[in-house]
Image (cartoon, rainbow, N blue to C red):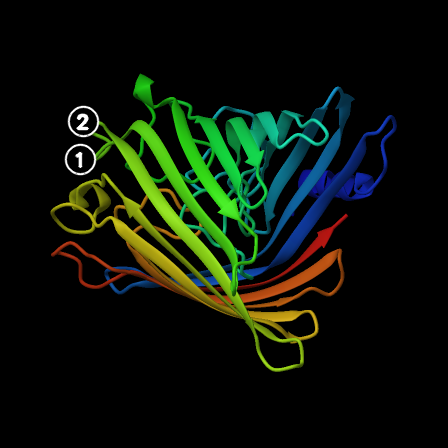
Amino acid sequence: MHARTMLVLALLLATGGAQAGDGWKTSGDLRFGYVSSETRARTGATSDADSFRARARLRASGELGGGWHASGRVAARLDTDQSDEQFWLRDYAPSPAGLEVGQATIDEAYLEYRAAESPWSLRLGRFQAVFGLADIMKKSLDQNDSTNFDITWVDGAWWQWRGDEWTTHAIVRHNDRKGPTGTLRRPLDFADSGSRAGLFLAAESRTNVGPLVQRMVTLTWLPSALRPNGLADPAVEDYLSATAKATAEWPLGTGGTKFRLGGEIGYAANTPRREAMNSGTGNSDALSWQTSFNFMDVLPDHDFGIVYGRVADGWLVSSDFRPNDTALEARWVWQASPDWQFDARVRRREEIDLPAAAAGARRDDDLYVRATWKF
C-alpha cells in the first residue's frame, strides 16, 4: 500500500480506544482479510482477481446535555490493488456500492435527541441504518449500510419509537441529484427534483414468541426515482417496495447448539423494463426472497450458516444481493473474544434472466477470509 494510506491507518489504530475528556469517548473497528473472485462472463470468457483488503473506522461520541448526544466517525476502505487515495466529502457516494477502494469519508456525523426514560428518539445528520436478518450473515433485501468491507451511509432524519414489544422506525433520506449515499441501483435516478427525499419505514420485534426471535416488516418509497425505460428516457415513476422478515430458533440436543432459520420476502410495486436491466424484454420481475440455515455454537463460539437468495431483476434496493441473481453462500464465524471475530465465506452468484442474444449467464464465484477487531 502507499505510504499515505499506511499513515492514515496507523493514525486510526494509534488513537483507537483512547478516552477523551468531558464525557466524550472514542471507539472503532478494523476489518482486514483476503478476498478472491472468478467471473465467467455471458460470452464464456473468464477473469479472476484477488487482493488483501481492509476497512478502518474511528468514532468520537459524547453527551451534550439535555438529552442530546453527538457522534462522528471517519471510515477508510483500503486495498492492495488500489491506484490512488482520496478523501470523499460530498452529498452522494462515488459508486452504487458506496466508497471505492482507496477512499475515506465521514460516514457518521449526527445529533440525536434521546431523553432518559423516553420511548422515542430522533437522529439528524449522517448515520448508519442496518435492518438485516438476525442470523450469522445478517443480510437484507433492503436497507443495510456498510456490509462486508463496504462503506455507505444515510443523510437525513431517523425517528424511533420503542414500545414494549415492537420498535418503529421512520427514516427520511436525502438523495443528491448526482446519486444516493447507499446501494440504490440503476435505473433508480435522482435527477428529478421530486426524488430528493426518500422514505423507509420499519417495525421490528425481538420479543420471543414461541420459536420466533425476530419479526420485521419494512417499506421503501422513492418518489420520482425510477426510470422504467432506462436512464436515457425522461419517464419517471415512484419506486415502492415492501418486505417481511422473520427468524426462528430451536435447540439441537443438550450441548448448547441451536438451529436458527431465517427468511425474508420482498415485493416491488413498480419495476423497470427488462430492456433497461439488460435481462430480456417485457416487465422485470418484482418478487425476491432469501432463506438462511444457521447452526449456532456448533462448537463454543463457532457458528456455521448457509443462505440462498433469489432476487428479481426489478429489485433495486439491496446492498447484499444484486438484481437478477441467485446467490448461494456458506459462512463460518468464530467469535474468539468480545473484541475479535473471524469469518470465512464462499459464494456463488448467477444471473437468472437473459436477453435473447446472450450466449450464457454470468457467474461469479468468490471467497474471503477476514478478521474484525473492535476497540
Mark 1 and 2 residues: CB-CB less than 8 Å, in contact?
yes
Residue under pointer 2: 235
Q: Position of residue 308 (x, y in %)?
A: 39, 65
| Residue 86 pos. (x, y %) | 58, 32
Q: Residue 340's x, y, as percent?
A: 73, 59
Question: Is residue 150 shown left or right of residue 199?
Answer: right
Q: Is residue 4 visible?
A: yes
Mark 1: amino acid: Asn
Q: Is residue 187 above or below residue 114?
A: below
Q: Secondary structure at mark 2?
A: loop
Nearest to the observer: residue 180 or residue 86: 180
Q: Amino acid at mark 2?
A: Ala
At 72% across and 43% down in the image, what residue appears? 28
In the rendered view, tell whether residue 373 sits above or below residue 226: below
Quarter location, residue 240:
top left
Query: At 24% across and 40% down in the image, what residue appears?
Result: 269
**Residue at the location (72% across, 23% down)?**
67
Observer-nearest of 121 and 35: 121
Question: Going from the N terminus, do you reach mark 1 or mark 2 first?
Answer: 1
| Residue 229: assigned label | 1
Q: Is residue 275 left or right of residue 335?
A: left
**Residue at the extreme right:** 21
Front residue of 330/241: it is: 241
